[in-house]
Amino acid sequence: MDKTVVELFAGVGGFRVGLNKVTKMNINGHAVENGDFKFVWANQWEPSTKVQYAYECYKKRFQSEEKELSNVDILKVDKKKIPSHTLLCGGFPCQDYSVAHSLTKEKGIEGKKGVLWWQIYEIIKEKKPPFILLENVDRLIKSPAMQRGRDFGIMLRCLNDKGYIVEWRVINAANYGFPQRRRRVFIFASRKDTNYATKISKKTIIDIINKNGIFAKTFKIQPIQYNAFPISIIDNYPNLVALSNDFEARFFNTGIMMDGQIYTIETNPILEEQTPLAKILLDNVEERYYLSEERIKKFEYLRKSKRIPRIKPNGERYIYTEGAMKPFDSHYLPGRTMLTSEGTLNRSTHIIKDAKGVRILTPIECEKLNQFPENWTDTMPERKRYFMMGNALVCGIIRKLGIQISKIIDKEK
């Protein structure tokens, strides 16, 4: 089996950087790929944006031709024309995945228009990739607030109906030696007719979670001693509409789905040595990244605890509260989760105090927090560079998973 890959919602190429172990660029600014995955197609399209900065960055770094890199709304892509591939990967938005019967019921079940999970699902139905690797914010497994677990349950039911076994783990990158405290859920699905899925299905749930599953082999945990109670997504829900209307479950940070049975349990990582923020900070930072006294005072206010009287649109009064943050980010801890607002006047922006004064992170430091090569995003305006890194993933997580996925594919027919 070849190691062909399709990357969806590609951004500036975090999955490709991770899977193919990209740590530097050559003198022409092109990625030096050291892995054995062959990316045959990728899609990146940013709605309501004239200049497609992420697409242009991906195109330059990977020297991608138009047939390999699509800059079209994924809703408009003919799924039949996507090349066949062994691994489908991508990070996608956490949205409302609810479904309903179509108005005429002639088309069966329909998801909400524009929700990108359904585009992934259409590709899975059409191309049937042996393996799937997805990433999302960790709140996915708890969404929506009024019906906990429904959205993730819908995803699992979709994958079950198309013949996949699914493993997932919520991973805080800092727990495994990476320089950012970024929590994300990673989902690995294997088609039931693969050697990997066949072997996994013969193991006990405890064995899969402790030692045999892809996450167990990649990110070590403290061994669990008891089994997870199964939740069926088949017995009580004849179709996706019924599941969408009625499903509710508590999903924990680790789990497996096989044959419509979900097993989920809370696990604890075996912590690896931390990479502190100090390791990624640059020397001789330009003066423009240092804050004026006025901006320092504004950040001090933003980071203070607050109790502010406010009024709802209906006239109801309430108190808006925010907890206090430390005035500066510690050099001795991994960085906090980067958001797309990084670098702006926002309480989530990292604030560094060094020998020269108080400053924000530079775009290069943000790239290093996500383990991209330095100046990976210097193809675009600086504000966009911060935005892209706030949207990106920690490439080292994908790099480690890629090692296991490569081994898995090597053992296939």
Image (spheres, rainbow, N blue to C red):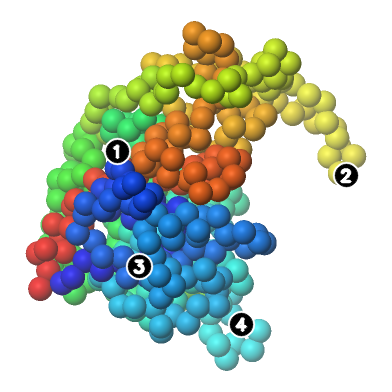
Going by the image, does 294 lie left or right of 203? right
Q: Earlier in the sequence, mark 4 or mark 3?
A: 3
CA distance separating discs 4 and 3: 30 Å
Q: Which residue is mark 2?
A: 314
Residue displayed at 63% across by 27% down: 347
Looking at the rendered structure, the secondary structure element under dot 2 is loop
In the rendered view, tell whether residue 214 sits above or below residue 271.
Answer: below
Instruction: Work out whether residue 397 can be spotted.
Output: no
**Residue denoted by label 1:** 267
Report helix, strand or loop for mark 3.
strand
User: From this viewpoint, which residue is outermost toward the bottom?
Assistant: 106
Mark 4 vs mark 3: in front:
3
* Residues marked 2 and 3 touching at CB (< 8 Å): no
Residue 243 image offset from top left, x and y in percent: 49, 68
Helix, strand or loop at label 4? It is loop
Q: Dot 4 corresponds to which residue?
A: 102
Give the crowd class for mark 1: few <14, some 14-19, many >=20 residues within 10 Å. Answer: some
Dot 3 alpha-carbon crowd within 10 angstroms: few under 14, some 14 to 19, many 20 or more: many
Measured in 3D between alpha carbons, the distance from the residue under mark 4 to the one under mark 1, in whole angstroms, is 40 Å
CB atoms of marks 2 and 4 within 8 Å: no
Q: Are marks 3 and 1 in contact (CB under 8 Å)?
A: no
* Relative side of 273 to 83, left or right: left
Mark 3, residue position: 6
Q: Position of residue 148 (x, y in %)?
A: 52, 51
Disc 1 marks which amino acid? Answer: Thr
The local crowd at label 2, few if under 14, some if 14 to 19, many if 20 or more residues have their Cα within 10 Å, is few
Query: Which is more N-terminal, label 3 or label 2?
Result: 3
Given residues 43 and 130, the one toward you in this image is 43
Q: Which mark is residue 70?
A: none
Q: Position of residue 38 (x, y in %)?
A: 26, 65
Residue at left 41%, top 34%? 369
Q: Is residue 229 left or right of residue 8?
A: left
